[in-house]
Image (spheres, grey):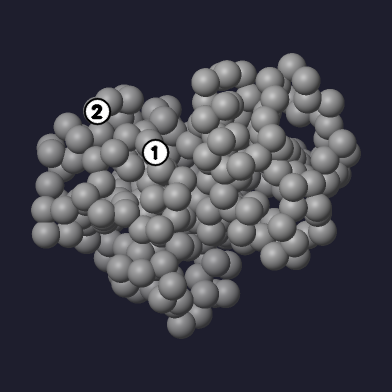
Amino acid sequence: KYFAVVGNPIIQSLSPKIHQAAYAFLGLDNLYSAHQVELGGLQQFLDKNMTLSGVSVTMPLKVEAFEISDKVDQIANQTEVVNTLVIQDSEYLGFNTDVFGLTKTVEGKNFSSVAVIGSGATARSAIYAMQQMPQTPSVKLFARNPVELERLATKFSITAEDISTYEGGFDLVINTVPALPILHSGYLLNTSYSKDESLATNQISGKEMLLWQALAQLRIFLSGSMSVEFEDEQGLMSAMRHSLS
């Protein structure tokens, strides 16, 4: 089967390494490639690549992927974000695995207050993910776009302020804005990773989120369900993680 990751820019994507390592571990001959697709061009790309069985969707196409989906899972419906498309019987089935990736990345860490920076697709997933955590932390949104700030505050019933008012002081900060330096005293998760990142104290690599969401994506691509686990997921995750070293 053929799979791909689409977005813009795409040259820095580590998804092909991760997915090809997973298929090798599982003994599958599936192929996974990367394609640069401009905003507004997702449908045209899919129309030209009819052999694809599934697509990983990254910035800035996650909302667009939601809009073209014929059916979506509950998480995608709640967030209005799709980062995983399955093409089945000429239909697009949309899923959101970013929420799974985020919750697994911060699992086991102690925090009661969360700041989410940004108002794009990943920020939506971050807010929703934190609202599903067992410790039910308080979540506050900081962003530049006043329209999205107000809309997301209403949608998720959270407080929101312009990013100029941000002064830190949160147990966990989830920064979804690439290359934006963030003041933090607790944990900091930059969802945008760099290939050669150097992490300071209490920083969480965005690659962890990438790996966990990819695991959920693989479950969907190969079984059709995010809840169907692989026989040796520990070994699979080890192979995927090793592909990034």
134 sits to left or right of 45: right
User: Which residue lies at the image location 53% right of the left edge and 53% below the top edge?
Assistant: 99
Quadrant where the image shows the N terminus: bottom left
Report the amino acid beneath label 1.
Lys
Residue 115 visible here:
yes
User: Which residue lies at the image location 81% right of the left edge and 54% below the top edge?
Assistant: 111
Q: Which residue is mark 2?
A: 41
User: Which residue lies at the image location 61% right of the left edge and 19% below the top edge?
Assistant: 144
Q: Which residue is mark 1?
A: 62
Report the amino acid beneath label 2.
Gly
- Image location of residue 243, percent across then percent down: 53, 56
125 sits to left or right of 67: right
Q: Quadrant of residue 10?
A: top left
Classed neighbour count for the residue bearing mark 1: other residues with Cα under 10 Å, few (<14), some (14–19), many (≥20): many
Q: Is residue 232 shown above or below 65? A: below
> Which mark's residue is nearer the viewer, 2 or 1?
1
Residue found at the very far bottom of the displayed protein: 231
- Image location of residue 98, percent across then percent down: 50, 51
Q: CA distance from mark 2 to mark 1?
A: 12 Å
User: Which residue lies at the image location 32% right of the left edge and 63% below the top edge?
Assistant: 221
Classed neighbour count for the residue bearing mark 2: other residues with Cα under 10 Å, few (<14), some (14–19), many (≥20): few
